[in-house]
Image: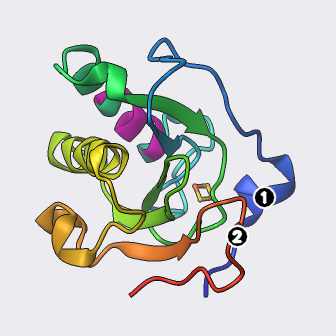
Amino acid sequence: MTSDTSNNAENAATMGVGTPQDCAAAPATLFVCITCRMSLEPGVSATMTTDGRELFDLVGLLHNTHPAADQVMVRSVECLGSCDQGCTAGIGAPGKFAYLLGGLEPTREHAAAILDCALLLGQQSGSVLGRLQRPPLLRNRLLGRMPPLPLSNPRNTAP
Ligand code: FES
């Protein structure tokens, strides 16, 4: 599948870096990797602002003024293990499949799409967020998904 790059090794990952967008009772959580870089070309300084950080900041701006902001918690995370897939984000909600999204860009359009996707997951009654339910921009950016935890039904599968 994917491989991590040395500058953002998985063993250095820190989950759950706090953000001002904290909403304790939010039904969904959106994780945005703040260490993703679109390019590892020579000349790109490791100290430069990352593309992932830019995406996270854009999500934060949208979240701060979103009418349903209390429905999703936004968290930064250092590495989601898909470092060669552009910017990455993950969404999850209790009792629902978790989704890993990649090929994202630090744009307002992509920030809005992943925020909307997390809101959709949290608000829907089913556990699976189908391809056509996702915002169009994200329909071909799914890297993986995992069933809800705990696995109350060992045959927990999705269509
Ligand atoms: S740096 Fe590894 S997924 Fe973002």
What type is the residue that disc 2 sits on? Asp
Residue situated in front as seen by the camera: 25 or 135:
25
Tag 2: Cα neighbours inside 10 Å, few (<14), some, or many (≥20)?
A: some
Q: Which residue is drawn at 54% across and 40% down?
A: 34
Q: From what the image shows, is residue 39 above or below residue 52?
A: below
Discs 2, 1 touching: Cβ within 8 Å: yes
In the rendered image of this protein, does residue 72 appear above or below residue 159?
above
Q: Quadrant of the C terminus?
A: bottom left
Q: Which amino acid does label 1 sit on?
A: Ala
Q: Which of 70 and 14 is in front in this view?
A: 70
Q: Disc 2 versus disc 1: distance between alpha carbons? A: 6 Å
- Left or right? Give the position of 118 relative to 148: left
Residue furthest to the right in view is 11
Residue at 42 percent of width and 63 percent of height: 127
Residue position for label 2: 4
Residue under pointer 1: 9
Q: Nearer the viewer, residue 28 or 116?
A: 28
Q: What colour scheme has been applied to the protein in the rendered image?
A: rainbow
Across and down, in percent, residue 120 comes to 26, 49
In this view of the protein, which residue sits in the foreground, 91 or 121?
Answer: 121
* Badge 2 residue CB within 8 Å of ligand 1: yes
Residue 9 visible within the image = yes
In-image side of 109 versus 28 (left or right): left
Q: On the rendering, which quadrant does ligand 1 occupy?
A: bottom right
Q: Viewed as shown, does residue 31 lie left or right of 66?
A: right
Can residue 60 be seen in this snapshot? no
Q: Position of residue 94 (x, y in %)?
A: 55, 47
Specify the segment rendered in magenta: 52-58
